[in-house]
Amino acid sequence: MKQFQIDFFNGHPIITEGENWILIDTGAPSTIHRTDQIRFCGDSYGCVVNYMGLTISNFSELIGTEITTLLGADVLLEYKILFDYANEVVTFSKDDMAFTGKQVEISNFMGIPILQMSAHSQVLKFFLDTGARLSYVTNDITKDYASIGTEVDFYPGVGQFETDCFEVPVVFDANSLAIKFGNLPEMLQRTLRLNGIRGIIGYDFFSRYQVLLDIQNGRLIYV
């Protein structure tokens, strides 16, 4: 078990281990690093140095701060991970942790965790993405809401884009939440829909709860 202090940069959770500045990104299927190997929590893992045409230097420029590593689902699914944004710490363990809360089942796609929320009386599937500072949902869910402003964000393969944002009520495990959503570019919305996904939940979710994420065993425990 190892605990790290989180340094938040514009909603992105970044930790330091040795000489590495690591962005924890449950929404990325692969770990991207400046070399093809990384040592993390005492173990060695293979990495890619280029993802969809982007290197770690490109990601650093898009995020706005230097990182050496984008830690993706291929490594993260090896661990039980306890996110505690309120205290700005995250704990990694390959063994079960003593953490008590409500448990919900999750699934995954290429290691990216998927949870269900309800909006407009529809049960929708969302990617749970620690790398997303802004949450997203498809246009049909936000079309009846007034914009509360615009945000500039980026997505691999698309680059930077601007989106209107909307505050939309959702229900997660009988809990009512108001989430600030943007809309991804139409091409990305279509890609998500092909996999039955209607959106992405990011920083807003983790800032509300302490979350134990166990991707490999299909469970999420929160309090």
Image (tube, rainbow, N blue to C red):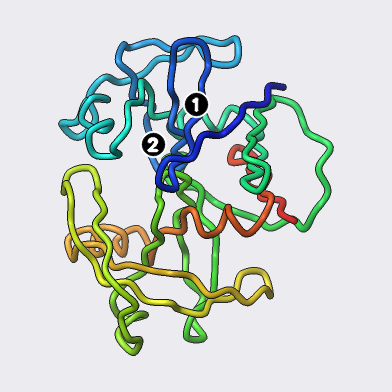
When asked about the image quadrant of residue 215, the answer is top right
- 128 vs 97: above or below: below
Q: Are marks 2 and 1 in contact (CB under 8 Å)?
A: no
Residue 169 in the image: x percent, y percent? 51, 80
Question: Label 1 amino acid?
Answer: Val
Residue 33 in the image: x percent, y percent? 34, 19
Number of the label disc, if any, that sits on residue 157: none
Q: Secondary structure at mark 1?
A: helix
- 177 vs 144: above or below: above
Q: Dot 1 corresponds to which residue?
A: 75
Q: Dot 2 corresponds to which residue?
A: 29
Question: Label 2 amino acid?
Answer: Pro
Q: Nearer the viewer, residue 17 or 81?
A: 17
Seen in the image, is 164 located left or right of residue 216? left
Q: Nearer the viewer, residue 182 or 214?
A: 182
- 104 vs 87: above or below: below
Residue at left offset 68%, top offset 42%: 87
